[in-house]
Image (cartoon, rainbow, N blue to C red):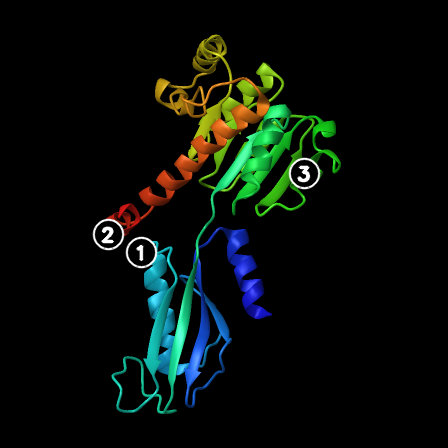
Amino acid sequence: MEWVRAVQRLRARREAGVLVTVLSVRGHAPREAGAKMVVAVDNVWGTVGGGNLEALGVERSRAMIGDGTATPEVLTAALSDKAPYQHGVQCCGGEVQLLLEPLPVVPSVAIFGVGHVGLELARILARHDIELHLVDSRADQLTAERLGVLEDAVAQVHVHNVPVLPELVVGELPPGTHVVIMTHDHAEDAALCDAAIRNAQLATIGLIGSSAKWTRFQRKLADDGNPPEAIARIITPIGLPNITGKQPAVIAVSVAAWLLERFTTQTTEALPASAQRKAQA
């Protein structure tokens, strides 16, 4: 189906859109209930009947994209030459309801290090509609058997086994990705931190570890030529401070909750002021 491919295309490109469906028809109309189209800022796939009906659907969809609207809407249009119209007359004589469902750009998270904590974190995040990147330099951490716990994931899971220079993956991540660094090797963590703060398109950079580790990292990052404001982009420790415990599952819950807070902040900050008020209401 064309509309299915269009949704997949928008998701892959990380572009927002709206899925428009003919919800109900009374009387005569150009398309039957269930007809669909997908609207993006600069393209339309499929059709719900053309003319004034479709133009209204496209216009409202693009307004929703611009406002960052997250709630579906129903648009009613009368197909009568006596009804008010904006884009030409349609006199089929019926009435059509269109369901407009936003297709937002979902959050993106990259976990560097899929050890005990990383895997527990992936299990939690995989239950959410996000893009989830799992990166590890150790092939045995990314086997199909070990990652089998993610088989029913809601998230789109991308596995990156990079035996050499895993920090190169940082440059391939989608803009707005939240990066969590928790590998088995402090030298690898340091290289990833350096690569991450040089990528201005990342949303947040979180590092797991002790205050002593962070003190050493700050010194090394500065010695490598990174300015203080770049180093300050790294957040450590990560997780919610009121959730304590050293068990992998406890740490994972704390970090997941911390990330969910950032998803909300990131979405709200990306909206115009009017949409922010709606989101906070």
Q: Is residue 16 visible?
A: yes
Q: Which image quadrant for residue 148?
A: top right
Q: Measuring 32% from the left and 62% from the top, which residue is drawn there?
A: 63
Identify the residue position indicated by label 2 in the image.
Answer: 274
Relative to 91, is 180 above or below? above
User: Label 1 near label 2: C-beta < 8 Å?
Assistant: yes
| Residue 180 position in % (x across, y down) | 51, 28
Query: Which dot marks residue 67?
Result: 1
Residue plotted at (26% across, 48% down): 281
53 vs 33, nearest the viewer: 33
Q: Residues within 10 Å of mark 2 (few under 14, many from 20)?
A: few
Q: What element does badge 3 sit on?
A: helix
Q: Earlier in the sequence, mark 2 or mark 1?
A: 1
Q: Residue at x 59, y 35 (%)?
A: 122
Task: Kindly report the distance in space between the C-alpha atoms of the residues bearing marks 2 and 1.
Answer: 8 Å
In this view, 55 is above or below 223: below
